[in-house]
Amino acid sequence: MKNKYFILAGLVFITGIVFTGCSDNRDDAKDNVKQANQEMIDAQVQYEKEWQQFKSDAELKINVNQKTIDDFKVAMKSTSTKFKATYENTVLTLEQKNIELKKKINDYQYEGKENWEEFKKGFNTDLEIVEKALKDIFEKKVNY
């Protein structure tokens, strides 16, 4: 009889420990979920801030490129026909690329950090190519 009570007391004790441990794990799990949610919110806020800055900078550069193209078109009217023949198609191609960049930045949808980094890298490369090509043509115009 004493063994039954001893075994029963042991089982109650062990059950109490298990339930207490589960409660702690639940509280820890809730805290972990809250922390993960907060980190996700912070990451989203950071992305939004970075995206707005990136988009603003990109649009500024695209607008500067378009102004350069427009100025160049006006200047081409008073240059030699040799220069016009050589660079008119190039300028139109660069203008089209500039328009595509504007569309690309406006159509971009966030699809994860890895894709975002890849988009930024590719977009910046394309933008730099247009900027450099416009600068090169403008420098050649001065030499004509």
Image (spheres, rainbow, N blue to C red):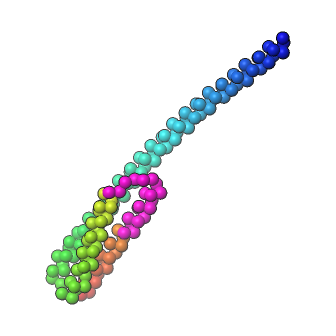
Tell me which segment is drawn in magenta: 107-126
- The chief SS type of the magenta part is helix
Using residue 144 as the reference point, say whether residue 113 is left or right of it: right
131 inside magenta stretch: no
Q: Residue at x 41, y 46 (%)?
A: 45
Most extreme residue toward the left, as rendered? 78
Q: Residue at x 47, y 57 (%)?
A: 114
Q: Position of residue 74 (x, y in %)?
A: 17, 76
Position of residue 17 relative to residue 38, above or below, is: above
**In this orientation, which residue lies closer to the viewer: 81 or 67?**
81
Quadrant location of the C terminus in the rendered image: bottom left
Using residue 34 as the reference point, say whether residue 3 is left or right of it: right
Q: Residue at x 19, y 76 (%)?
A: 73
Q: Residue at x 32, y 76 (%)?
A: 133
Residue 138 visible in rendering = no
**In this orientation, which residue lies closer to the viewer: 64 or 86?**
86
Using residue 142 as the reference point, say whether residue 50 is left or right of it: right
120 inside magenta stretch: yes
